[in-house]
Image (tube, grey):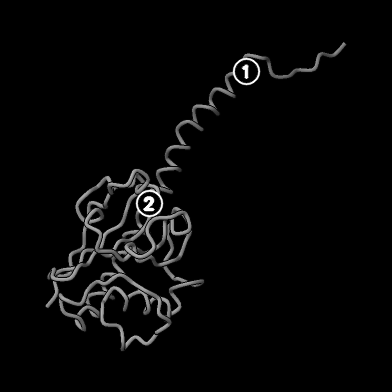
């Protein structure tokens, strides 16, 4: 009688062990690649916003940077007195807001713009693409002072501006919920 040759149990265990070792090596590398790509997206978003703000901020003085946003239905850019409101209206009118914001939060895939002081961080506004704020917690505190602030802002690009300051800060909230190490500061003229 002819015997069929097959794999022994030991040979199968060795092959499975090799595959497990390869998976243990490759999975973290792949996850790091995704994380690095998300960080690159956030850096690019900051850079694009910084370029836009450098030009647009010349129209405003340091006393007209921020006022709590209220949607009074007036979408005329020329009648926006405060830079924060101007930014919101600009992004909405130019196809950035509502349904087709060109910038995305890489973690939530949301595309909205949020005025932090007006809407607060309720679930509907979690992880927006862009946050305009004069909240000092965003400026000074890496814990963001809210117990769930890290989750709510992860992946958001922050534009920090406040009346009387002679600069505007732009940065993002990274995967760990901390302020990015690079903060772009735009001096006002």
**Mark 2 element type:** loop
Where is residue 30 drawn, in percent x and y? Answer: 45, 43
Q: Are marks 1 and 2 in contact (CB under 8 Å)?
A: no
Instruction: Answer few, some or many: residues within 10 Å of disc 1's Cα (few below 14, many 20 plus, some between 14 and 19).
Output: few
Q: Is residue 115 above or below residue 23?
A: below
Q: Which residue is mark 2?
A: 154
For the point 40% across and 84% down, the residue is 75
C-alpha gap between disc 1 and disc 2: 47 Å
Q: Which residue is mark 1?
A: 11
Q: How many marks?
A: 2
Disc 1 element = helix
Residue 138 percent coordinates (x, y):
26, 55
Determine whether, in the image, residue 189 is placed left or right of residue 98: left
Q: Is residue 48 above or below residue 157?
A: below
Q: Nearer the viewer, residue 19 or 118?
A: 118
- Residue 72 appears in which quarter of the rendering? bottom left
Image x and y of residue 103, in percent: 41, 67
**What is the x, y in percent for residue 123?**
46, 54
**Residue pictured at 45% horizontal, 65% vertical:** 111
Eye-nearest disc, 1 or 2: 2
Image quarter hosting the N terminus:
top right
Disc ID at residue 108: none
């Amino acid at each position: 009688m002819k015997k069929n040759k097959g794999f022994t149990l030991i040979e199968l265990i060795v092959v499975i062990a090799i595959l497990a070792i390869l998976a243990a090596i490759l999975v973290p590398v792949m996850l790091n690649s995704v994380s690095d790509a998300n960080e690159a997206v956030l850096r690019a978003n900051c850079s694009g916003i910084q370029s836009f703000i450098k030009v647009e901020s010349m129209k405003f003085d340091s006393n007209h940077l921020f006022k709590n946003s209220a949607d009074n239905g007036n979408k005329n850019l020329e009648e926006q007195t405060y830079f924060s409101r101007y930014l919101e209206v600009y992004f909405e009118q130019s196809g950035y807001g509502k349904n087709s914001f060109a910038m995305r939060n890489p973690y939530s895939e949301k595309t909205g713009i949020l005025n932090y002081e007006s809407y607060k961080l309720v679930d509907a506004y979690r992880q927006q693409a862009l946050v305009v704020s004069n909240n000092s917690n965003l400026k000074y505190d890496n814990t963001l002072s809210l117990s769930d602030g890290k989750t709510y802002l992860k992946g958001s690009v922050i534009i920090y501006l406040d009346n009387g300051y002679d600069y505007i800060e732009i940065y993002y909230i990274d995967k760990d919920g901390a302020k990015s190490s690079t903060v772009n500061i735009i001096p006002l003229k």
